[in-house]
Amino acid sequence: MPDPTSSPSVRSRRRAVRAVAPAHHASRAPSLGEKLLLLASSPAAKTAFVVVGTVGLAALAVALVGPRRLEKDVIRPLRGAIEPQAEKLWADAKPLRDQIAGLLENATPAGRKKLARSFQSWIGHFHAS
């Protein structure tokens, strides 16, 4: 008996795949509710919601605790913990800041633009990671 897979009359089990034609819908303008929903779910709106919520919580904290107590119990201790570290980091970065200033000072105007683009790209690379 001949092998059925080698016979030219045997059809493949796979069916041909056809692209599905896109459905044509009548285009209509979105309703006011749909527009508002799209606007409210945009990234800019979400950022605004977070900012407004944070400001509201801060205002509530000031109202409940009082500005003097908030200054005494929260802001002064934070400032005391953060300022020395910030000053140390700023001092440690002095050689790098001087090197960048020297590069920009010695560059031609076209070179400055190129350096600025390069620094922006470098900062963006580290900001994204």
Image (spheres, helix red, strand yellow):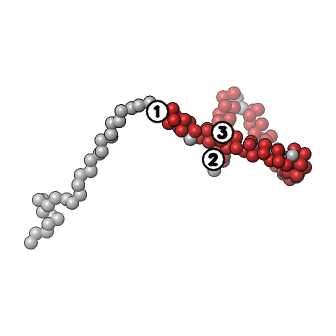
Residue appearing at x 54%, y 38% in the figure: 37
Disc marking residue 18: none
Give the number of the mark in front: 3 or 2: 3
Task: Note whether residue 92 is visible.
Answer: no
Q: Which residue is mark 1?
A: 30
User: Circle 1 — which element?
Assistant: loop
Residue 79 at x, y = what percent? 86, 48
Percent position of residue 54, x then y: 72, 44
Q: Residue at x 65, y 36 (%)?
A: 117
Local packing at callout 3 (Cα closer than 10 Å; few below 14, some 14-19, many 20+) is few
Residue at 66 percent of width and 31 percent of height: 113
Residue name at image x 69 percent, y 32 percent: 112
Q: Is residue 43 above or below residue 113?
A: below
Q: Which residue is mark 3?
A: 48
If you read the primary sequence from the N terminus, does the residue marked by circle 1 or circle 2 appear first? 1
Q: Which is more N-terminal, label 3 or label 1?
A: 1
First along the sequence among labels 3 and 2: 3
Q: Position of residue 17 (x, y in %)?
A: 27, 50
